[in-house]
Amino acid sequence: MTCFGATINCSNIDSNIANINLIFGYVGPTGSSSNGTIVFFTGDGGVASTLGATNAFAADYVGSYTIVYVDWASDWEQISSTASEENILEAACRPATFMSYINGSSTIHPSGAMCAQGKSAGSAAIAYSMSWYGAGKTSAGGYLTNVELLAGPVLSEIDQGCTADPPNVSICSGESGQPTCETNQSGNWTTSAGYTPNDSSGIDSWAGLPTSGSGSCGMISGTDPTLQHMSIVNGQYGTVTPAYIFNTTRHGWLCAGPVSNYYDSASDCYIGTGTIYCPNNSSPQGWYWYLQAGDSDNNLVVTGTNSCKGTLTDSPPMLYETEAEGVEGGFDGSDTTESETLAIEADMTSKCKITP
């Protein structure tokens, strides 16, 4: 890759947003022609010590696309060291600015489609950028041609994820007015929108909640307007009216079904532990965002992934790493024999192109 150091300044959004440093790199296409550019966003804070499954996707895309990675110097979701100033919606100015810069670079993205792929909080970075910062194509503008959203976006309704009694969300139930869903073994399923204990510490930090003891996320009684206002859905940012229906094609990939539909559930996900291997909030949180489009967005498809199990380890004996959001290691909702990784790649390469 050709790599650069850079700084993003979002003080025009809010003077409380500190500058953030990053390293980004690009490579490809290695083939004889280019279909465009694909930007990757990794999960959590985007401070990637390892890119995991992203490498496998990039290796398959790079023949026909310029591949762009970004590694933030600190969590992109945290704007300040002062708790009262934290606002994840405003912090999303950072990934939105980065994508806009790549889209406008004649060196990195000279032609073709502009696309993005993100997992977990990385899919939230894309969703914020589309709904609040003009990256998604609408009648008002926008530039993203296609996005693949793995296990998320996980910050759609933060207030619902942090309540002491979070709601159970029915996903892909087939009710009138819902987005198009692909499911097979799982059918429709119901999962709590609450953040699991291992995930709530990040929310505490990014949202400016107290972090002593067990933290505050998951302990809040009732709907918290501050958390609601920094969510992708029902957020508040100046006079901006968020968009939820797009001309950008987008595909959401959500871990489906109950614990029994999870990879190695008997040994890795025993009920009552809150381990990182159990189904977490990523599916209901993602569904909150997709549900805003209803059945009015013909460019949206949601797939319920069966037997989520993550990626292969980097060294022998090359076992799967079970993880709560491992859609890439599962099976396609419409074909129990097809790897979800192959399905995601096929969807990206078929849609990330400029058609006459």
Image (cartoon, rainbow, N blue to C red):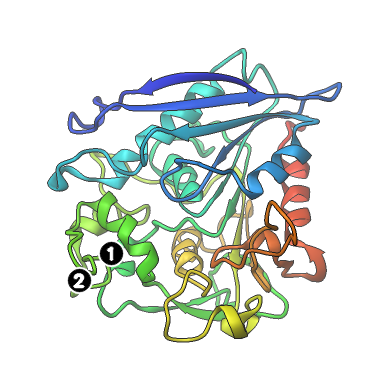
Give above or below for 187 relative to 81: below
Q: Which residue is mark 2?
A: 220
Q: Quadrant of the C terminus?
A: top right
Q: Which residue is mark 1?
A: 159
Work out whether residue 258 can be spotted.
Answer: no
Give above or below for 330 relative to 184: above
Mark 2 crowd level (few <14, some 14–19, many ≥20, 10 Å Cα): some
Badge 1 element: helix
Image x and y of residue 181, in percent:
64, 68
Which comes before the other along the chain, label 1 or label 2?
Answer: 1
Give above or below for 339 relative to 62: below
Image x and y of residue 333, in percent:
72, 70
Q: Which residue is located at x 25 percent, y 25 percent?
A: 12
Q: Which residue is located at x 26 percent, y 57 percent?
A: 204
Image x and y of residue 16, in percent:
18, 33
Q: What is the quadrant of residue 165 in the picture?
A: bottom left
Q: Residue furthest front?
A: 316
Image x and y of residue 287, in percent:
49, 65
Q: Which residue is located at x 31 percent, y 60 percent?
A: 201
Q: State which mark lies toward you, 1 or 2.
A: 2
Name the amino acid type tagged 1.
Answer: Asp
Name the amino acid type tagged 2.
Answer: Ile
